[in-house]
Amino acid sequence: MSNTAPSPLDGTPISYDSQGDGSPVVLVHGITESSASWSPVVDRLATDHRVITLDLRGHGASDTADRYDLGAMAADVIGVAAACGADRPHLVGHSLGGAVVSAVGAAIPVASVVNVDQSLQLGAFKAQLMEFEAQLRDAEVFPLVIGAMFEMMAGALAGTPEFERITAERRPDQRVVLGVWEMLLTMSEADVNAVVEGALAGYGGVAVPYLSLFGIDPGDDYAAWLADHIDGAVTEVWPDQGHYPHLIDPDRFVDRLRSFWS
């Protein structure tokens, strides 16, 4: 990436790229990944949209920082959108990026938010993550644990050239990952839930088209929970797609984006 923009939070240089023309779309990657993960989607969207991709702090070509919390990463996205002059962009985020764009959509005017396979019930995720805390904090074991986590979630993408590409591009930096997950590892479930409630409070009384698309079923109660926090939010599950439904069938995914936006 040849462009950088300072994060409005702390000045951290954030690497980004822009391709195509049309209404702006900002794509935000998942933890340990980079903007390169979106390549098949960018190729298809840039035919009729301005597609902006970025590397979150501590990922890809962007600088490391002292903070990796949700607010800091949301600021990264807001800074890049401002640098690109992207007013009211569509936001699309995968995994960690899904949580980040959800926070951004509550903070600034956007055209829509699409969250790919990231439950916002982070209190529940905390319980799962705590089982691996000791391994995550062990520098020698850490890369193996991260690799196993994503292999387990890969679903239909496992064993394909596309999963090999994503795995080869993955950069599991222990300090960054622990920084991102610090809230989950150190705060109580009640406090984690309070942070989520605060982050989503900006959706109150504001009409923001919001699509939550899962390849791993988030549970029967999730759609109602999300609609209680984001008025009109739509939850869809593409069964047995795993954590990467946007990469298993990028044509279907981009078609779904376009139909949602229309």
Image (cartoon, rainbow, N blue to C red):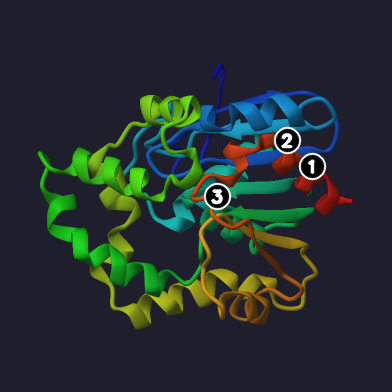
**Residue type indicated by callout 3:** Gln
For the image, the number of numbered tags is 3
**Residue type indicated by callout 1:** Asp
For label 2, the crowd category at 10 Å Cα-Cα, with few meaning under 14, some 14 to 19 and many 20 or more, is some
Q: Secondary structure at mark 2?
A: helix
Quarter assignment of residue 102: bottom right
In the rendered image, the quadrant that contains the N terminus is top right
53 left or right of 72? right
Asked if marks 2 and 1 touch (Cβ < 8 Å), the reply is yes
**241 vs 260, nearest the viewer:** 241
For label 3, the crowd category at 10 Å Cα-Cα, with few meaning under 14, some 14 to 19 and many 20 or more, is many
Q: Residue at x 34, y 35 (%)?
A: 64
Residue 67 in sight here: no
Question: What x and y, as percent, mark residue 213?
Answer: 63, 57
**Residue type indicated by callout 2:** Asp
**107 vs 241, nearest the viewer:** 241
Q: CA distance from mark 2 to mark 1?
A: 6 Å
Q: Which residue is mark 2?
A: 251
Quarter assignment of residue 172: top left
Above or below, 147 against 97 in this view is above
Question: What x and y, as percent, mark residue 237?
Answer: 62, 61
40 left or right of 130? right
Label drawn at residue 255: 1
**201 vs 164, nearest the viewer:** 164
For marks 3 and 1 on the same chain, the one whose residue lies earlier in the sequence: 3
Q: Which residue is mark 3?
A: 241
